[in-house]
Image: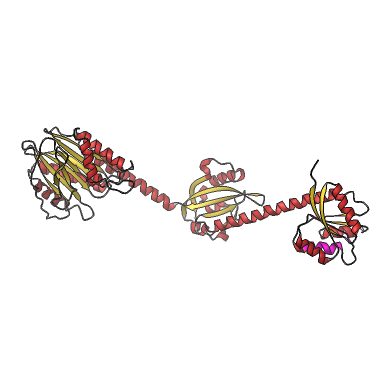
């Protein structure tokens, strides 16, 4: 058995008997009826305020009231309820007037067969009207949200119909194109394109706007825009579909990307410059370590993403000794790479004509002083290894400390700075530090600051102790294996992130 539908009925009627007839007919029609009978304006208003109702049935003539007055009160209350007139005898002209006034139907008391179908029909209509109001309210709210969002957008926002005619423009249109929003309303989108590009873009936009089907590359497109006064700018246009009030609209979000494109171009040029510097830098490194017993020698430089100025070199000296250079030119790019090449050339010439490492750096600094300043200079350690005496002697122009470790990997000597970086002081004089005697099993470490200053994800430095621990673990291996182990340890310590600085080192193991 089908459960009866609840129906709340407000009956404007002075006859209790007639009201009961209406209720019984509705119950016979399958409704569970809750009703109240009123017969004055006061009781009608009170009932409308106190309870919710589904339908109003009103007799046309009451002793002190009538259906038209009841209809006006219902309309003034703001409620949208089906209002049906049920009367014993009104003329057709009165019935028509009542319908024009807003009544939904009228029935004769002598013929109530239409009562249930009429109530059902009007209940459906009332439900449809309620849904339509909700949709319209939602549209108004969404349109308000859109407007608030668009009004405050930094991008130019245009609302267009399917012919690409502009119906809304936000304030940012003036910033991008120079037109006040009201100046573009009613105009076609092609107003904002250079004349030479309009035919192609007109076809593209028309096809997209009419169909909404576009190649994925065209939904966000880059093109040229025309500002007021004919100035051209590079723009990015993103198109989106939008449904409002049952109509199809399209929203264009337009951004001036002129500065972004300029920055991208500069970045590409910068990257190309770094690549040139990197190639210069890599060509200057020695191809292989020298065969210079009893010293096992290995060196490597692992550049950061931005080409830096690290370098190392092996130089044969006129007295048969071997000079090892490790250096760092401040800065990145072609300038430091060229300064590194210049320094390398001077040292190669000087080491073939001089034996004293202090004198070599003094002369090199004097020449470089003409080409460098306080923002660009060279830190450099020049170390001379003597096969006959199994010793080293060095001088350091502001370079990070190097280390001599004994067979137990304890620090035997520190190769500290002995002077200022090259080029900072034209009259700077460099002297060699006292010789360091070397024994079998000793390991000499010469580094740039990228090694010890490598950072972990927790912002800790790699430091010297970690460096020494790596050397201890690989002390019985070759110099080349020690270099590789140090590099891998630094990379692992840094979380395998790209290094912030070049990682350059030379290891000399005494046999």
Does the magenta run of residues contain 70? yes
Camera-side residue of 159 and 200:
159
**Residue 474 vertical placement versus 254 (above, below):** above
Camera-side residue of 435 and 345:
435
Q: Residue at x 86, y 47 (%)?
A: 28
Q: Residue at x 18, y 33 (%)?
A: 476
Q: In this view, does 247 lie to the left or right of 10?
A: left
Q: Residue at x 89, y 64 (%)?
A: 62
Viewport quadrant of the N terminus? top right
**Residue 14 vertical placement versus 329 (above, below):** below
Does the magenta run of residues contain 214? no
Camera-side residue of 157 and 205:
157
Q: Is residue 355 left or right of residue 227?
A: left
Q: Is residue 462 left or right of residue 190?
A: left
Residue 289 location in percent, x, y?
17, 34
Residue 500 location in percent, x, y?
30, 46
* Chain part drawn in magenta: 52-75
- Which quadrant holds residue 462? top left
**Residue 38 vertical placement versus 451 (above, below):** below
Q: Is residue 26 visible?
A: yes
- Which quadrant holds residue 104? bottom right
Q: Can residue 337 be seen in this view?
A: no
């Amino acid at each position: 058995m089908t459960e009866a539908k609840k129906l709340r009925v407000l009956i404007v009627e002075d006859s209790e008997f007639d009201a009961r007839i209406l209720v019984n007919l509705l119950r016979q029609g399958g409704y569970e009826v809750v009703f109240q009978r009123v017969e004055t304006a006061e009781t009608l208003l009170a009932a409308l305020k106190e309870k919710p109702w589904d339908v109003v049935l009103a007799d046309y003539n009451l002793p002190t009231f009538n259906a038209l007055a009841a209809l006006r009160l219902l309309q003034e209350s703001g409620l949208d309820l089906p209002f049906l007139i049920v009367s014993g005898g009104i003329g057709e002209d009165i019935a028509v007037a009542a319908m024009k006034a807003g009544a939904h139907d009228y029935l004769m008391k002598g013929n109530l067969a239409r009562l249930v179908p009429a109530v059902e029909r009007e209940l459906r209509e009332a439900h449809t009207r309620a849904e339509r109001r909700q949709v319209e309210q939602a549209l108004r709210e969404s349109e308000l949200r859109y407007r608030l969002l668009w009004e405050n957008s930094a991008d130019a926002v245009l609302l267009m119909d399917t012919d690409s005619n502009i119906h809304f423009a936000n304030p940012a249109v003036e910033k991008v194109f120079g037109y006040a929003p009201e100046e573009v309303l009613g105009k076609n989108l092609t107003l904002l394109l250079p004349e030479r590009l309009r035919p192609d873009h007109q076809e593209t936009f028309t096809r997209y706007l009419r169909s909404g089907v576009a190649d994925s590359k065209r939904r966000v497109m880059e093109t040229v825009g025309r500002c007021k006064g004919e100035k051209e700018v590079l723009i990015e246009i993103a198109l989106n579909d939008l449904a409002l009030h049952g109509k199809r609209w399209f929203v264009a979000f337009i951004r001036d990307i002129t500065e972004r494109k300029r920055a991208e171009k500069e970045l590409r040029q910068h990257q190309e410059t770094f690549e040139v510097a990197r190639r210069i830098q890599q060509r200057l490194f020695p191809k292989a370590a020298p065969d210079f017993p009893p010293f096992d020698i290995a060196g490597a430089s692992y550049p950061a993403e931005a080409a830096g100025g690290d370098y190392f070199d092996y130089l044969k000296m006129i007295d048969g000794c071997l000079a090892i250079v490790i250096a760092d030119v401040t800065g990145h790019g072609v300038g430091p790479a060229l300064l590194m090449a210049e320094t390398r050339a001077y040292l190669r010439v000087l080491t073939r004509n001089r034996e004293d490492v202090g004198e070599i750096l003094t002369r090199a600094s004097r020449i470089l002083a003409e080409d460098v300043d306080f923002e660009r200079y060279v830190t450099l350690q020049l170390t001379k290894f003597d096969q006959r005496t199994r010793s080293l002697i060095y001088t350091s122009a502001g370079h990070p400390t190097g280390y001599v470790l004994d067979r137990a990997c304890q620090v035997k000597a520190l190769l500290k700075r002995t002077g200022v970086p090259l080029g900072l002081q034209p009259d700077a004089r460099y002297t060699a530090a006292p010789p360091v005697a070397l024994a079998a099993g000793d390991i000499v470490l010469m580094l740039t600051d990228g090694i010890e200053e490598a950072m972990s994800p927790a912002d800790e430095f790699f430091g010297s102790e970690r460096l020494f621990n790596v050397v201890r673990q690989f002390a019985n291996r070759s110099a080349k294996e020690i270099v590789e182990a140090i590099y891998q340890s630094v990379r692992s310590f840094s979380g395998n992130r790209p290094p912030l600085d070049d990682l350059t080192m030379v290891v000399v193991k005494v046999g």
